Amino acid sequence: MQGGSTGIVYGGLKYQARCIADVKADPDHTSFLAGTLSLREENEVHLIRLSPSGTELVCEGLFYHPSEIWDLKSCPFDPRIFSTVFTSGETYGASIWKIPELYGQSNAPQLEQLVSLNEHSFKIKCVLWWPLGKHDKLISIDEGNLFLWSIDSSSKIAKVISKESVGMLHNLSGGAWDPHDQNAVAAICGSSLQFWDLRTMKKTNAIEHAQVRDVDYNPKKQHILATAEDECGIRLWDLRMPRLPAKELPGHAHWTWAVRYNPEYDELILSAGTDSAVNLWLASTTGSDDSAAESLVDSPTRQIDPLLNSYNDYEDSVYGVAWSCQGAFNVCIIVL
Protein backbone atom coordinates (compact mmCIF):
# COMPACT_ATOMS: atom_id res chain seq x y z
CA MET A 1 0.00 0.00 0.00
CA GLN A 2 1.44 3.35 -1.03
CA GLY A 3 0.70 7.06 -1.00
CA GLY A 4 2.13 8.09 -4.33
CA SER A 5 5.53 8.20 -6.00
CA THR A 6 7.12 9.96 -3.05
CA GLY A 7 4.69 8.63 -0.47
CA ILE A 8 4.83 6.33 2.49
CA VAL A 9 4.67 2.57 2.04
CA TYR A 10 2.70 0.36 4.42
CA GLY A 11 4.30 -3.07 4.35
CA GLY A 12 1.94 -4.88 6.71
CA LEU A 13 -0.27 -6.61 4.13
CA LYS A 14 0.79 -10.25 3.80
CA TYR A 15 -1.78 -11.02 1.09
CA GLN A 16 -3.18 -9.28 -1.95
CA ALA A 17 -5.88 -6.65 -1.41
CA ARG A 18 -8.32 -4.66 -3.53
CA CYS A 19 -10.32 -2.79 -0.88
CA ILE A 20 -9.35 0.43 0.87
CA ALA A 21 -11.68 2.78 2.79
CA ASP A 22 -11.16 5.99 4.69
CA VAL A 23 -12.36 5.88 8.32
CA LYS A 24 -14.18 9.19 8.01
CA ALA A 25 -15.88 8.89 11.43
CA ASP A 26 -12.50 9.15 13.20
CA PRO A 27 -12.00 12.93 13.54
CA ASP A 28 -8.68 12.70 15.39
CA HIS A 29 -6.64 10.55 13.02
CA THR A 30 -5.93 9.85 9.38
CA SER A 31 -7.09 6.23 9.31
CA PHE A 32 -7.91 3.63 6.66
CA LEU A 33 -9.27 0.09 6.53
CA ALA A 34 -7.89 -2.44 4.05
CA GLY A 35 -9.15 -5.97 3.36
CA THR A 36 -7.30 -8.90 1.81
CA LEU A 37 -8.41 -11.63 -0.62
CA SER A 38 -6.25 -14.68 -0.12
CA LEU A 39 -7.59 -17.92 -1.60
CA ARG A 40 -5.96 -20.27 0.88
CA GLU A 41 -5.21 -18.30 4.03
CA GLU A 42 -7.49 -16.66 6.59
CA ASN A 43 -8.02 -13.12 5.40
CA GLU A 44 -7.39 -9.94 7.34
CA VAL A 45 -8.75 -6.45 7.88
CA HIS A 46 -6.05 -3.91 8.71
CA LEU A 47 -6.74 -0.68 10.58
CA ILE A 48 -3.99 1.62 9.31
CA ARG A 49 -3.17 5.03 10.76
CA LEU A 50 -0.83 7.82 9.80
CA SER A 51 1.64 8.41 12.63
CA PRO A 52 1.53 11.74 14.53
CA SER A 53 4.76 12.75 12.82
CA GLY A 54 3.21 12.03 9.41
CA THR A 55 6.21 9.93 8.41
CA GLU A 56 4.83 6.38 8.52
CA LEU A 57 1.68 4.29 8.23
CA VAL A 58 1.27 2.02 11.24
CA CYS A 59 -1.03 -0.92 11.95
CA GLU A 60 -3.40 0.01 14.77
CA GLY A 61 -5.32 -3.25 14.51
CA LEU A 62 -5.25 -6.51 12.59
CA PHE A 63 -8.44 -8.57 12.54
CA TYR A 64 -9.12 -11.97 11.02
CA HIS A 65 -11.87 -12.22 8.42
CA PRO A 66 -13.28 -15.59 7.28
CA SER A 67 -13.36 -15.06 3.50
CA GLU A 68 -11.95 -13.11 0.54
CA ILE A 69 -12.95 -9.44 0.81
CA TRP A 70 -14.16 -7.89 -2.45
CA ASP A 71 -15.84 -4.78 -1.05
CA LEU A 72 -15.19 -2.87 2.17
CA LYS A 73 -16.87 0.31 3.38
CA SER A 74 -16.37 2.21 6.64
CA CYS A 75 -19.42 3.41 8.56
CA PRO A 76 -19.59 7.23 8.21
CA PHE A 77 -20.78 7.81 11.79
CA ASP A 78 -19.04 5.12 13.87
CA PRO A 79 -15.28 4.49 13.39
CA ARG A 80 -15.53 0.94 14.75
CA ILE A 81 -18.20 -0.28 12.31
CA PHE A 82 -17.67 -1.34 8.69
CA SER A 83 -19.18 -3.60 6.04
CA THR A 84 -17.65 -6.28 3.82
CA VAL A 85 -18.75 -8.25 0.79
CA PHE A 86 -16.96 -11.58 0.66
CA THR A 87 -16.73 -14.89 -1.18
CA SER A 88 -15.47 -18.33 -0.30
CA GLY A 89 -15.52 -20.77 -3.17
CA GLU A 90 -19.05 -20.73 -4.57
CA THR A 91 -20.57 -19.02 -1.53
CA TYR A 92 -20.92 -15.28 -1.04
CA GLY A 93 -22.18 -12.93 1.62
CA ALA A 94 -22.22 -9.46 3.14
CA SER A 95 -21.99 -8.49 6.79
CA ILE A 96 -21.68 -5.53 9.12
CA TRP A 97 -18.79 -5.83 11.58
CA LYS A 98 -17.63 -4.04 14.70
CA ILE A 99 -14.00 -3.63 15.69
CA PRO A 100 -13.43 -4.67 19.32
CA GLU A 101 -11.86 -2.34 21.85
CA LEU A 102 -8.13 -2.55 21.28
CA TYR A 103 -6.87 -1.69 24.76
CA GLY A 104 -3.48 -0.79 23.31
CA GLN A 105 -3.08 -4.12 21.50
CA SER A 106 -2.43 -4.14 17.75
CA ASN A 107 -3.83 -7.64 17.23
CA ALA A 108 -7.47 -8.39 18.06
CA PRO A 109 -8.38 -11.47 16.01
CA GLN A 110 -12.13 -11.59 16.66
CA LEU A 111 -14.35 -9.11 14.87
CA GLU A 112 -17.90 -8.83 16.17
CA GLN A 113 -20.43 -9.65 13.45
CA LEU A 114 -23.37 -7.29 14.01
CA VAL A 115 -25.66 -8.37 11.18
CA SER A 116 -25.58 -10.52 8.07
CA LEU A 117 -27.29 -9.30 4.90
CA ASN A 118 -28.48 -12.76 3.94
CA GLU A 119 -31.50 -12.15 1.67
CA HIS A 120 -29.48 -12.22 -1.54
CA SER A 121 -29.88 -14.99 -4.10
CA PHE A 122 -27.39 -13.52 -6.60
CA LYS A 123 -23.72 -12.70 -6.16
CA ILE A 124 -23.39 -9.58 -3.99
CA LYS A 125 -21.35 -6.74 -5.47
CA CYS A 126 -21.30 -3.95 -2.87
CA VAL A 127 -22.79 -2.36 0.24
CA LEU A 128 -23.46 1.39 0.37
CA TRP A 129 -23.69 3.69 3.40
CA TRP A 130 -25.22 7.13 3.03
CA PRO A 131 -22.02 9.22 3.18
CA LEU A 132 -23.19 12.16 5.30
CA GLY A 133 -24.07 11.70 8.96
CA LYS A 134 -26.01 9.06 10.82
CA HIS A 135 -28.58 7.13 8.82
CA ASP A 136 -30.24 3.85 9.80
CA LYS A 137 -30.52 2.58 6.22
CA LEU A 138 -28.13 0.58 4.06
CA ILE A 139 -28.14 -0.35 0.38
CA SER A 140 -26.82 -3.64 -0.93
CA ILE A 141 -26.48 -4.46 -4.61
CA ASP A 142 -26.21 -7.92 -6.12
CA GLU A 143 -26.04 -8.87 -9.78
CA GLY A 144 -29.80 -8.67 -10.25
CA ASN A 145 -31.31 -6.67 -7.39
CA LEU A 146 -31.19 -3.49 -5.37
CA PHE A 147 -31.97 -3.88 -1.63
CA LEU A 148 -32.79 -1.18 0.93
CA TRP A 149 -32.22 -2.29 4.54
CA SER A 150 -33.14 -0.97 7.94
CA ILE A 151 -30.20 -1.56 10.30
CA ASP A 152 -30.28 -1.61 14.11
CA SER A 153 -26.67 -2.37 15.04
CA SER A 154 -27.32 -2.19 18.80
CA SER A 155 -29.96 -4.95 18.55
CA LYS A 156 -28.12 -6.73 15.70
CA ILE A 157 -31.17 -6.64 13.44
CA ALA A 158 -31.27 -6.10 9.67
CA LYS A 159 -34.59 -5.97 7.82
CA VAL A 160 -35.27 -5.56 4.12
CA ILE A 161 -37.48 -2.51 3.60
CA SER A 162 -37.74 -2.84 -0.16
CA LYS A 163 -36.19 -4.69 -3.06
CA GLU A 164 -36.26 -4.22 -6.81
CA SER A 165 -35.02 -6.40 -9.65
CA VAL A 166 -33.33 -4.88 -12.69
CA GLY A 167 -34.49 -7.72 -14.95
CA MET A 168 -32.87 -10.71 -16.58
CA LEU A 169 -31.17 -8.71 -19.32
CA HIS A 170 -29.21 -6.52 -16.93
CA ASN A 171 -26.30 -7.16 -14.59
CA LEU A 172 -25.50 -4.82 -11.69
CA SER A 173 -21.88 -4.43 -10.61
CA GLY A 174 -21.71 -1.49 -8.17
CA GLY A 175 -23.01 1.95 -7.34
CA ALA A 176 -22.91 5.08 -5.21
CA TRP A 177 -25.35 6.82 -2.86
CA ASP A 178 -26.02 10.50 -3.57
CA PRO A 179 -24.67 12.57 -0.62
CA HIS A 180 -27.13 15.36 -1.47
CA ASP A 181 -30.24 13.17 -1.50
CA GLN A 182 -30.91 10.20 0.80
CA ASN A 183 -33.45 8.86 -1.71
CA ALA A 184 -31.18 8.75 -4.77
CA VAL A 185 -28.69 6.05 -5.75
CA ALA A 186 -26.65 5.41 -8.89
CA ALA A 187 -26.26 1.76 -9.96
CA ILE A 188 -23.75 0.48 -12.50
CA CYS A 189 -25.69 -1.77 -14.87
CA GLY A 190 -23.96 -3.31 -17.87
CA SER A 191 -23.49 -0.62 -20.50
CA SER A 192 -25.40 2.04 -18.56
CA LEU A 193 -25.50 3.92 -15.28
CA GLN A 194 -28.99 3.84 -13.78
CA PHE A 195 -30.48 6.21 -11.21
CA TRP A 196 -33.07 4.99 -8.71
CA ASP A 197 -35.50 6.63 -6.30
CA LEU A 198 -35.42 4.65 -3.04
CA ARG A 199 -38.91 5.78 -2.05
CA THR A 200 -40.51 4.05 -5.03
CA MET A 201 -37.63 1.73 -6.00
CA LYS A 202 -38.13 2.88 -9.56
CA LYS A 203 -35.57 3.97 -12.13
CA THR A 204 -35.66 7.74 -12.70
CA ASN A 205 -32.90 8.32 -15.23
CA ALA A 206 -29.97 6.66 -16.97
CA ILE A 207 -26.69 7.39 -18.73
CA GLU A 208 -26.63 5.03 -21.69
CA HIS A 209 -23.74 3.50 -23.65
CA ALA A 210 -21.24 3.91 -20.82
CA GLN A 211 -19.01 1.00 -19.79
CA VAL A 212 -18.68 2.11 -16.17
CA ARG A 213 -16.51 0.36 -13.57
CA ASP A 214 -16.81 2.90 -10.75
CA VAL A 215 -18.81 6.01 -9.89
CA ASP A 216 -18.47 8.79 -7.32
CA TYR A 217 -20.69 11.77 -6.56
CA ASN A 218 -19.23 15.24 -6.20
CA PRO A 219 -19.34 15.90 -2.43
CA LYS A 220 -19.92 19.64 -2.82
CA LYS A 221 -22.05 20.09 -5.93
CA GLN A 222 -25.45 18.51 -6.48
CA HIS A 223 -26.16 16.71 -9.80
CA ILE A 224 -22.43 16.20 -10.55
CA LEU A 225 -20.65 12.85 -10.61
CA ALA A 226 -17.61 11.12 -12.08
CA THR A 227 -17.39 7.71 -13.74
CA ALA A 228 -14.40 5.42 -14.33
CA GLU A 229 -14.80 3.70 -17.67
CA ASP A 230 -13.39 0.94 -19.83
CA GLU A 231 -12.53 3.50 -22.48
CA CYS A 232 -9.28 4.37 -20.74
CA GLY A 233 -10.32 7.36 -18.67
CA ILE A 234 -12.93 9.15 -16.57
CA ARG A 235 -15.93 11.29 -17.42
CA LEU A 236 -17.68 14.03 -15.47
CA TRP A 237 -21.45 14.29 -15.76
CA ASP A 238 -24.14 16.84 -14.99
CA LEU A 239 -27.27 14.77 -14.33
CA ARG A 240 -29.50 17.60 -15.50
CA MET A 241 -28.00 17.00 -18.99
CA PRO A 242 -27.13 13.29 -18.98
CA ARG A 243 -26.99 12.62 -22.71
CA LEU A 244 -23.38 13.80 -23.05
CA PRO A 245 -20.56 14.06 -20.49
CA ALA A 246 -19.70 17.53 -19.23
CA LYS A 247 -16.00 16.67 -19.49
CA GLU A 248 -13.87 13.77 -20.66
CA LEU A 249 -10.46 13.05 -19.12
CA PRO A 250 -8.63 10.23 -20.93
CA GLY A 251 -5.23 9.71 -19.31
CA HIS A 252 -5.25 5.92 -18.80
CA ALA A 253 -3.84 3.33 -21.19
CA HIS A 254 -6.16 0.54 -20.05
CA TRP A 255 -9.31 0.03 -17.94
CA THR A 256 -9.96 2.71 -15.35
CA TRP A 257 -11.00 0.88 -12.21
CA ALA A 258 -11.54 3.57 -9.55
CA VAL A 259 -12.45 7.25 -9.30
CA ARG A 260 -12.69 9.40 -6.17
CA TYR A 261 -13.46 13.05 -5.52
CA ASN A 262 -11.43 14.86 -2.88
CA PRO A 263 -13.79 15.39 0.10
CA GLU A 264 -12.73 19.02 0.59
CA TYR A 265 -11.55 20.29 -2.81
CA ASP A 266 -14.04 18.81 -5.22
CA GLU A 267 -12.08 19.86 -8.32
CA LEU A 268 -9.38 17.38 -7.27
CA ILE A 269 -10.10 13.85 -8.53
CA LEU A 270 -8.12 10.62 -8.33
CA SER A 271 -8.39 7.85 -10.90
CA ALA A 272 -6.65 4.48 -10.97
CA GLY A 273 -6.56 1.56 -13.33
CA THR A 274 -5.10 -1.63 -14.68
CA ASP A 275 -2.37 0.35 -16.48
CA SER A 276 -0.62 0.61 -13.07
CA ALA A 277 -1.20 4.37 -12.97
CA VAL A 278 -2.87 6.73 -10.50
CA ASN A 279 -3.82 10.10 -11.98
CA LEU A 280 -4.50 13.30 -10.06
CA TRP A 281 -6.86 15.64 -11.92
CA LEU A 282 -7.87 19.26 -11.46
CA ALA A 283 -11.21 19.47 -13.20
CA SER A 284 -14.47 21.36 -12.93
CA THR A 285 -17.78 20.93 -14.73
CA THR A 286 -18.47 24.68 -14.87
CA GLY A 287 -16.84 25.17 -18.27
CA SER A 288 -13.82 26.96 -16.81
CA ASP A 289 -11.94 26.24 -13.62
CA ASP A 290 -13.42 28.44 -10.90
CA SER A 291 -11.77 30.25 -7.98
CA ALA A 292 -11.55 27.12 -5.83
CA ALA A 293 -9.58 25.36 -8.52
CA GLU A 294 -7.49 28.44 -9.26
CA SER A 295 -6.44 28.71 -5.62
CA LEU A 296 -4.61 25.40 -6.01
CA VAL A 297 -2.29 26.63 -8.80
CA ASP A 298 0.21 29.49 -9.00
CA SER A 299 -0.95 31.14 -12.21
CA PRO A 300 -4.74 31.32 -12.59
CA THR A 301 -4.56 33.22 -15.88
CA ARG A 302 -2.85 30.44 -17.86
CA GLN A 303 -4.62 27.44 -19.36
CA ILE A 304 -4.55 24.64 -16.80
CA ASP A 305 -3.72 21.10 -17.86
CA PRO A 306 -6.35 19.02 -16.00
CA LEU A 307 -3.82 16.23 -15.38
CA LEU A 308 -1.80 17.53 -12.45
CA ASN A 309 0.26 14.39 -11.97
CA SER A 310 0.43 10.74 -12.98
CA TYR A 311 1.91 8.33 -10.46
CA ASN A 312 2.93 5.43 -12.67
CA ASP A 313 5.81 3.72 -10.90
CA TYR A 314 3.64 0.85 -9.64
CA GLU A 315 4.35 -2.63 -10.96
CA ASP A 316 0.78 -3.98 -10.85
CA SER A 317 -2.79 -2.89 -11.43
CA VAL A 318 -4.26 -0.33 -9.04
CA TYR A 319 -7.79 -1.21 -7.91
CA GLY A 320 -8.43 1.03 -4.92
CA VAL A 321 -7.79 4.63 -3.88
CA ALA A 322 -9.10 6.60 -0.92
CA TRP A 323 -8.76 10.20 0.19
CA SER A 324 -8.61 10.93 3.90
CA CYS A 325 -11.34 13.20 5.24
CA GLN A 326 -9.01 14.38 8.02
CA GLY A 327 -6.13 15.41 5.76
CA ALA A 328 -7.40 16.77 2.46
CA PHE A 329 -4.24 15.77 0.59
CA ASN A 330 -3.61 12.41 2.25
CA VAL A 331 -4.23 9.44 -0.05
CA CYS A 332 -4.04 5.67 0.34
CA ILE A 333 -3.59 3.45 -2.70
CA ILE A 334 -4.03 -0.31 -3.02
CA VAL A 335 -1.71 -2.01 -5.52
CA LEU A 336 -2.60 -5.63 -6.35
Image (cartoon, rainbow, N blue to C red):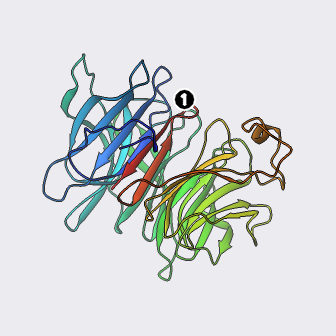
Instruction: Give x and y (percent) for residue 304.
Output: 76, 51
Q: Is residue 179 above or below residue 59?
A: below
The part of the image, by quadrant, that contains residue 156 is top left
In this view, the residue in front, 187 or 13, is 13
Instruction: Give x and y (percent) for residue 110.
Output: 19, 34
At 43% from the left and 65% from the top, the residue drawn is: 274
At 21% from the left and 68% from the top, the residue drawn is: 90
At 75% from the left and 71% from the top, the residue drawn is: 244
Q: Is residue 168 above or below residue 53?
A: below
Q: Is residue 185 above or below residue 153?
A: below
Is there any visible trace of residue 73 in the rendered image? no
In this view, the residue in front, 169 or 245, is 245
The part of the image, by quadrant, that contains residue 203 is bottom right
Work out which quarter of the rendered image holds the N terminus and state it. top left
Question: How crowded is the residue under tag 1: few (<14 C-alpha within 10 Å), some, or many (20+)?
Answer: few
Determine the secondary structure under disc 1.
loop
Q: Is residue 276 left or right of residue 222?
A: left
Q: Is residue 194 left or right of residue 114?
A: right
Q: Please, what is the three-letter code of the amino acid marked with disc 1?
A: Gly
